[in-house]
Image (cartoon, rainbow, N blue to C red):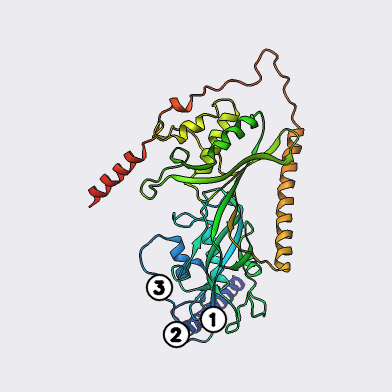
Amino acid sequence: MAAAAAGGDGEAAVMRAEVAALRLRVQELERENQRLGKIASRCTCGSSKDDSAASSPVVSESLSSSKQEPQKNVKSHCRGCQVGVVSHCPKQLIALKIMYFGQRFYGFASEAHTEPTVESEIFKALERAKLLVGSRKESCYSRCGRTDKGVSATGQVISLFLRSNIKDAKLDVLDNKSEIDYVKVLNRILPHDIRVIGWCPVAGDFLAREYKYLFWKGDLNISEMQKAALKFIGEHDYRNFCKMDAANVSNFRRHITDFNISAYDQRSNYDELWAITIKGSAFLWHQVRCMVAVLFLIGQGLESPCIVDSLLDITKTPRKPQYKMASEIPLILRSCLFDEVNFMCSSEASQALIEHLKDEYHQYMLQAAIFCEALSCLCSPEPDPFEPRHKKRNHIPLMSRQTEPSYEERIAKVKTKSAGSV
């Protein structure tokens, strides 16, 4: 018993010593906290070292449609303080050519309070690289176009003022050069499904956008689809081939310069891949996906090519028939074309980009091979000679379907709602 009591006293003594040591450590940390607080109170930079999106006026503005003015940046007077947005460095207005794979993004633009978006990821990278000059508004930011949730791009273009050299301030992510390699710098920071593929000083006028939509041919009648596609070329009112935004858009006339359907020179064991290529100066919300949806109905023999004429005639068809858009996944913003613009990319950055895309491609090919292996393990059922090969769908002709409100009805509703809120 005496031995047990002695052992208990020894453990108690050890615990008391540990508690005393912890109290001393807490006191030391409190003194250190007070010291750092005094240093922070004397700092006039108005910003922390945190590189997160929340610390940046530019990124905050891109993630929110709030009408509050972004906080003005103050030049740092505290040694060691760094900010992601600077306004006292040499700058130039440049264009960045961007590639992204949109499956996990909620579109390109970051105005819908939904994350992640391509645009918000780009601004986070620009902030981390300390390339931003002033707020987003002060940087004169603009984008060539916006893509919806799930849509990819190989040639999106944005423009804004960025730092032009690092003569006055060495940036950790940059090589020790006076000229900034924007492609190399940003691709070190951006997520794997977004890449900058070129940059240039802004010059020249915007000419056109080109979209590409990939699809498996199956039993589609390509000649009928191409016959219908040619009807889109030229300037038309496309209100029956879009998602109407009456509050912000009143002119639905758009000019399409080229509309072509061609084999994509790739096939699987079961089908052949084709592509629809569309080029025009501007597009309405969901316009490409609506046009493709109608073409698929024509290719399936469910509609005639002349349905395009009927839907383009807003006198005959002032209200859009209800129909489902084509999927967003195979849609690509192929390029944004400018007059006399040559995007630059260093050989080192270009090689790194090629290797990155090859690695991504090989990963997806491995995944496809796994699915192919799984299919090979299954036995195809014997066909029933008395059952038709394809069951007929109960298709309701487009011109016999229920329709959406016309533009005039929508705008009247918007005005009534505005008057009621006042």
| Disc 3 packing (10 Å; few <14; some 14–19; many ≥20) | few
Indicate the quadrant containing the N terminus: top left, top right, bottom left or bottom right: bottom right
Query: Does the image show residue 43?
Result: yes
Q: Is residue 279 above or below residue 308?
A: below
Sequence-first tag of 1 and 3: 1
* Label 2 residue SS: loop
> Which numbered dot is residue 71?
3
Gap between marks 1 and 2 measured at Cα: 34 Å
- Ranked by sequence position, the earlier of labels 1 and 2 is 1
Which residue is labeled 1 in the image?
21
Which residue corresponds to mark 2? 43
Q: Is residue 285 visible?
A: no
What's the residue type where badge 1 is placed?
Ala
Can you tell which of label 2 and label 3 is closer to the viewer? 3
* Residue at position x 38%, y 50% in the image: 248
* Type of amino acid at the residue the image marks with label 2: Cys
At horizontal 74% and vertical 55% (from top left) the residue drawn is 358
